Image (tube, helix red, strand yellow):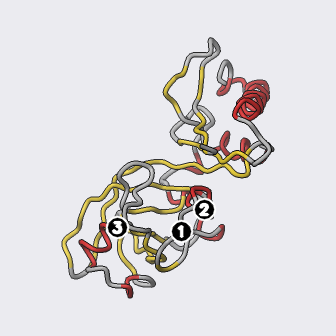
Amino acid sequence: ERILSIHARDGAGRWRGLGVSYLDFRDFQAATRTFSGLAAFSQSAMTLGDDDRAAERASGAFVSVNAFQMLGEKPTIGRDFVDQDDQPGAPAVVILGSRIWSARYGADPTIVGRTVRVNGVPSTVIGVMPDGFRFPVVSDVWQPLAHLPGVMNQTRDTCGLHAFGRLTDRSTQAQAQAEIASIAARLSREYPPTNRNTG
């Protein structure tokens, strides 16, 4: 009940069914005081490949490094993402879901540290999430947000990320809504070509 989702609205206050841009998300992260943290994700199909197995399509997501921690979840083996994983040019890493770990890799605990190909890119497996964890909906594979193709070059009117945050113990939903609206209004003034009439 402390997790809130952030979506875009137009100038008339109508929900547009959009998420936020990467740049706006970073600005929200830097400015918020009512949230203990903000995270973002983008769902995507991913292809897993190995030298000794046929390639397999899986539902996946690119997530900011704090996403699992904010949800109160952590890998059952291996480790979570860290800040160094979510930098442009960082070595590719991946966390697997329990379902695909069991079905594809026989629940082998030595999978951690091995290299698999994700969308053709060699990626080190750093962890496996608990059984039943498939955030945001049915994902089985996760990579850091920085590995989302083109995300670092997106403009502010590319609203493809889903953002959410955990309220601080002292904050209410109404306070958070007011704060996010205020930040969005400032961004609308500062970046009118992309953010005008967007809240």
- Marks 2 and 3 close (CB-CB < 8 Å): no
Residue underneath mark 1: 74
Q: CA distance from mark 3 to mark 1?
A: 26 Å
Closer to the observer: label 3 or label 1? 1
Is 117 drawn above or below residue 8 in the view shown?
Answer: below
- For marks 3 and 1, the one nearer the N-term is 1
Q: Are marks 2 and 1 in contact (CB under 8 Å)?
A: yes
Q: Earlier in the sequence, mark 2 or mark 1?
A: 2
**Label 3: which residue?**
120
Give the foreground label among 2 and 3.
Answer: 2
- Front residue (pair 9, 169): 169
* Horizontal and vertical percent position of residue 10: 60, 18
- Up the image or down, 121 lies above or below 190; here it is below
At 57% from the left and 48% from the top, the residue drawn is: 40
In the image, what residue type sits under mark 3?
Gly
Q: Position of residue 38 (x, y in %)?
A: 66, 48
Q: Which residue was labeled with disc 2?
A: 69
Q: CA distance from mark 2 to mark 3?
A: 28 Å
Quick one: label 3, few (<14), some, or many (20+) residues within 10 Å? few
